Amino acid sequence: MNIATDELTLYLSDELETEKLGHILAGLVSESGQGLVIFLEGDLGMGKTTLSRGVMRGLGHQGAVKSPTYTIVEPYEHLNPPAYHFDLYRLGDAEELEYMGIRDYFQGQNLCVIEWPERGQGILPDPDLRIRLGSRGDGRDARLSAPTTRGGSLLARVGRQWQPQQGH
Ligand SMILES: Nc1ncnc2c1ncn2[C@@H]1O[C@H](COP(=O)(O)OP(=O)(O)OP(=O)(O)O)[C@@H](O)[C@H]1O
Ligand SMILES: [Mg+2]
């Protein structure tokens, strides 16, 4: 495994900006045509689901995107690439992921977006991209880091596409 060499911090001034980051990620993921694992970290209410919604909508999903808190995973298999949104908040034990056949999700061109990945430690694969959301002023900071080469090139492209709102 490569060590993280790339980091990027973006200021997301409101919910729409969080979704915008999701759109950018969606565009880059579909462009690359490769599977990807994204960890979304940060406390309760920091915008992880909002960011996931931006990703799914950016891939063309038109319906609701709610956190699969009780079902653990919500599939969006009609999208290209097929996407899976995980929320591990209520996971009792990381081992439960083994029983649900977690490994099958992380294959091929699948995109896996995972809220509360800390709860799946030891079972989840390493992410390509890790996004940590924290509060700053009225908005959020998104700290992106890329533990894999694939994630690193994606992160560099996010940096080029991101246009901060006026005044930030
Ligand atoms: N950049 C932002 N600035 C301010 N508020 C935001 C921003 N992004 C999202 N929010 C708001 O934060 C609230 C919580 O968002 P969200 O449900 O996505 O958080 P979460 O991290 O998924 O929470 P949980 O840990 O409970 O799953 C929502 O009201 C959303 O509108
Ligand atoms: Mg959530």
Image (tube, rainbow, N blue to C red):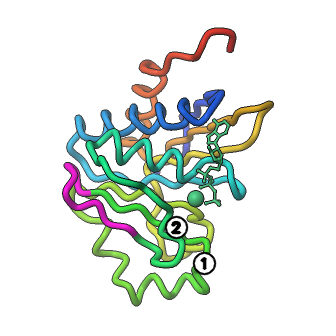
Horizontally, residue 148 falls left or right of residue 131, namely left
Nearest the camera: 3 or 115?
A: 115
Q: What residue type is labelled 2?
A: Asp
Residue ID at (76%, 32%): 138
Q: Residue 87 carries which label?
A: 2
| Image position of 146 with respect to 109: above or below | above
> Magenta segment, which residues?
74-82
Residue 25 x %, y %? 39, 37
Give how far across and how far down residue 7 sits, in percent: 58, 34
Q: Is the magenta stretch mostly helix, strand or loop?
A: loop
Q: Is 63 displayed left or right of 54 in the figure? A: left
Please give the label number shown on residue 90.
1
User: Is 121 within the magenta?
Assistant: no
Tell me the CA gap for discs 1 and 2. Answer: 8 Å
Residue 17 appears left or right of 97: right
Q: In this view, does 35 lie above or below 133?
A: below
